[in-house]
Amino acid sequence: MWILRHLLVLLMHLFLGSLAQKFSNGYYYQDIVNGNGNGNGEIYFHKIRLHVESPETLVSGVQGSNATLPCHYRYEPALSAPRRTRVKWFWQPVSGEGQERDVMVAIGTRHRSYGDFKGRVRLHRSAPGDASLVINPLQSDDTGRYRCEIIDGLEDESVTVQLNFRGVVFPYHSSRGRYLMNFHEAKEACEKQDAHLATFEQLYASWEEGLDWCNAGWLMDGTAQYPVVVPREACGGTELAPGVRSYGVRDKSLDRFDAFCFISTIRGEVYFLQHHIKLNFTEAVEACQSDGARIAKVGQLYAAWRFVGLDQCDAGWLADGSVRYPITQPRMNCGTSEPGVRSLGFPPKHLKHGVYCYKVRW
């Protein structure tokens, strides 16, 4: 009798357990609402797999515009009804140093964004399973690694997408001379030129494109570095291989270097003002104003050279008191054999030159 009674109990448990299962898409799901679950109707999967993918793991954007970081999720095999999933996006610097920061979280139609991303991010939602992140507008410090995490009950999968800016890095030094700016002064100097301090990744990408500069400059991470394409004695010696040379992390208040600035957009038109006579600096400023514009900044000239292809073999005043000109097609009497923005330094302001103006597009 004792054995028979235990067999009956065992059969009853097996029968009740089978009733707690749901059948869908040819597979059984174990409902945990009334068992050990959290009351959200979540389920353990049997033979169902959650996939999270991105067709692009590297996205390039332009400061001031928008960018979409792709993230898509799906179930294999496909489910007959939509699931209640949670979407979370995180941000981390490209260097990978430091903790991830929350960007946004979304459940159904509800979402919340955090920190500097507040009010600038949303999910694309163009189709079922589309969890792509839209950032609008892009700000200068938005570059980095973004991780898209999809959470469904006890299941979670993620994918990482890197956001870079298309832009140009340019070296910059004080009008007083070389190696005279601490970190804070270098940061301010770049911002005055409509740019910001470059990151190591931006400087490295510029080195890969051929940037060769023998003077160390501050970067956003507080290091002082410089890119060398052709090793030479004046740039650390010929024994060292080409690359980005580093002085490491420096004292932001006491140490002094030049700066590497980065600009990734231009919102107006830069042009060489055709004038019947050459101008001193004061006259150059007034001439641009008379033309309904203002004298261009260094960053704006570099952006026009890189993004618009501005090519002008005429030296002109810029807002910081320097004289420069952009060349995309090298030729005789227009500087070196490489494209670039040529610099005549900071001449006395009474000398006569042309001028580059900047007119905002409305």
Image (cartoon, rainbow, N blue to C red):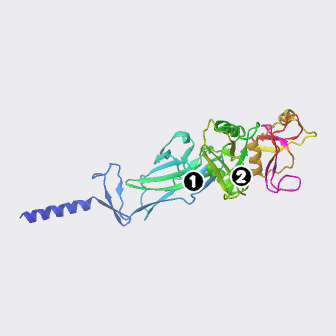
Say which residue appears at 71% left-offset and 40% top-offset.
Answer: 179
Q: Locate the C terminus and report the quarter of the image it occupies.
A: top right
Residue 279 point in image, percent of width and height: 89, 37
Element under disc 2:
helix
Nearer the observer, 75 or 160: 160
Q: Is residue 266 visible?
A: no
Whether 155 is drawn above or below 253: the answer is below
Residue 247 point in image, percent of width and height: 63, 47
Question: What secondary structure prevails in the magenta region?
Answer: loop
Element under disc 1:
strand
Residue 333 point in image, percent of width and height: 89, 53
Instruction: State if disc 2 and disc 1 touch (CB < 8 Å).
Output: no
Whether 174 is drawn above or below 4: the answer is above
Mark linked to residue 235 = 2
Say which residue appears at 60% left-offset and 39% top-offset.
Answer: 251
Please give the range of residues in magenta. Answer: 316-341
Mark linked to residue 162 = 1
The amino acid beneath tag 1 is: Gln
Q: Locate the N terminus and report the quarter of the image it occupies.
A: bottom left
Mark linked to residue 73 = none
